[in-house]
Image: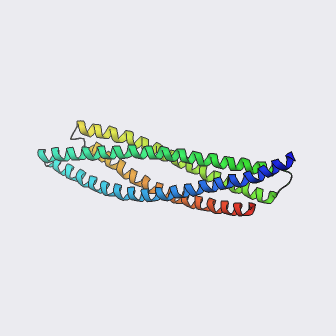
Amino acid sequence: MKKISTILALFLFVPTIIMGQFGQNIKEKRQDKKEIKQSQKIIIRDKQELNQFIIKAKEYRKADSLKSTLKIKNLHRGILADMEREINQTKLKIKEAKTEVTRSKKEVRGENREIKKDLKDLSQKNGDHKDDKKDLARNKRDKRDDIRDTKDDKRDLNQLKKRLTSQIKLKNKFNKNKNNLKALKRFTKTLIADGIQNKNELREDKIELKEDIKETKNDRIENREIR
């Protein structure tokens, strides 16, 4: 009787695990879509701000060559304000990137649990081991994808941290010395690099969405097989 109760408990528990993973994949898919929309908005905003910054930098260099003191003073103040805005935006991106790293690590842990369950199923004497092997192969593949995503997210975070450090130093240099056109030029390059990273992250978000859609589809199939 005890053996039957144990088997029944396992029978009821397995679908619960699968439904939990299914729900997690649905949640991840929604998050991916949200991040894609956000990335698209950021790309548009940053491109506009970059163009405006480049225009101001050109005007500043022109004013500097003409020794237009009043114009230099006004442009200098405006450019410093733009630099501060970009620094604050980079800080916000770092905060969001940290959240993304945490989420990616959580997804890896989820796949580890799935793989552990698959290995346990394979160790059972009875059961459809053909399906268990397919599940194990699929979850291992999903784990590789999640590990790759985690590495990408960590790389993005490190790039943002380096960019923040550089932007703060360049802003301070330009603030101390109005004639430091080199600092102005280098700050412009950080904005260009940021735009490139934004596009790369959008591409990565779209790849993650495809992966999560595929995982959700596989979970539906597995859930139907158990029922």
Q: Position of residue 198 (x, y in %)?
A: 43, 54
Q: Total of numbered circles in the picture?
A: 0
Q: Name the residue: 38% across, 45% down.
A: 90
129 left or right of 153 in image: right
Q: In the rendered image, is residue 10 in sight?
A: yes
The extreme top residue here reads: 176
For the point 22% across and 37% down, the residue is: 177
Relative to residue 12, is residue 91 drawn left or right? Answer: left
Instruction: Identify the residue at image location x=63%, y=45%.
Output: 109
Where residue 174 appears, as percent x and y from the top left, is: 26, 40
Image coords of residue 197 (percent x, y): 43, 52
Q: Nearer the viewer, residue 39 or 203?
A: 39
Residue at 45 percent across and 46 percent down: it is 96
Residue 165 location, quadrant: top left
- Is residue 194 rendered to the left or right of residue 85? right
Taking 96 as reference, is 7 left or right? right
Please state which of residues 211 and 121 is positioned toward the viewer in this rendering: 121
Q: Is residue 121 visible?
A: no
Q: Position of residue 103 (x, y in %)?
A: 54, 47
Q: Quadrant of residue 138?
A: bottom right
